[in-house]
Image: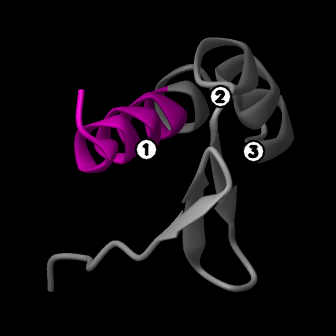
Amino acid sequence: MSDEELILNYDQKFWELVEDKGYSYRKARRILKKKYPSVYYDAQKDIWTINGKVHHVEEDK
């Protein structure tokens, strides 16, 4: 799986947990940390990190 696909999968699962199951952002991140240990999103800087490598994802407008 490419890094871009990994980020998209993580993002999709995150919003499923938050919107569909009603979890808090914090709990959703904790759950996904187990499944995607190498993926991290820094909301303040709006950057994704995979295994310490920074990825910028362009959002669809």
Name the image quarter holding the C terminus: bottom left
SS at mark 3? Answer: helix
Q: Is residue 7 magenta?
A: yes
Q: Residues within 10 Å of mark 1 (few under 14, many from 20)?
A: few
Marker disc for residue 11: 1
- On the image, numbered disc 2 is attached to which residue? 22
Mark 3 or mark 1, which is nearer to you?
A: 1
Name the image quarter holding the N terminus: top left
Horizontal side of residue 35 vs 4, given as left or right: right
Mark 1 or mark 2, which is nearer to you?
A: 1
Q: Quadrant of residue 54?
A: bottom right
Marker disc for residue 25: 3
Magenta segment main secondary structure: helix
Q: Which residues are magenta?
A: 1-16
Q: Residue at x 65, y 28 (%)?
A: 22
SS at mark 2? Answer: loop
Q: Amino acid at mark 1?
A: Asp
Q: Residue at x 73, y 25 (%)?
A: 33
Residue 13, above or below 3: above
Q: Residue 18: horizontal and vertical position, in percent?
A: 59, 36
Residue 7, above or below 28: below
Nearest the eye: 2 or 33:
2
Marker disc for residue 27: none
Nearest the eye: 30 or 21:
30
Q: Amino acid at mark 3?
A: Tyr
> In the current view of this chain or complex, which residue is farthest to the left?
61
The answer to which of marks 3 and 1 sits earlier in the sequence is 1
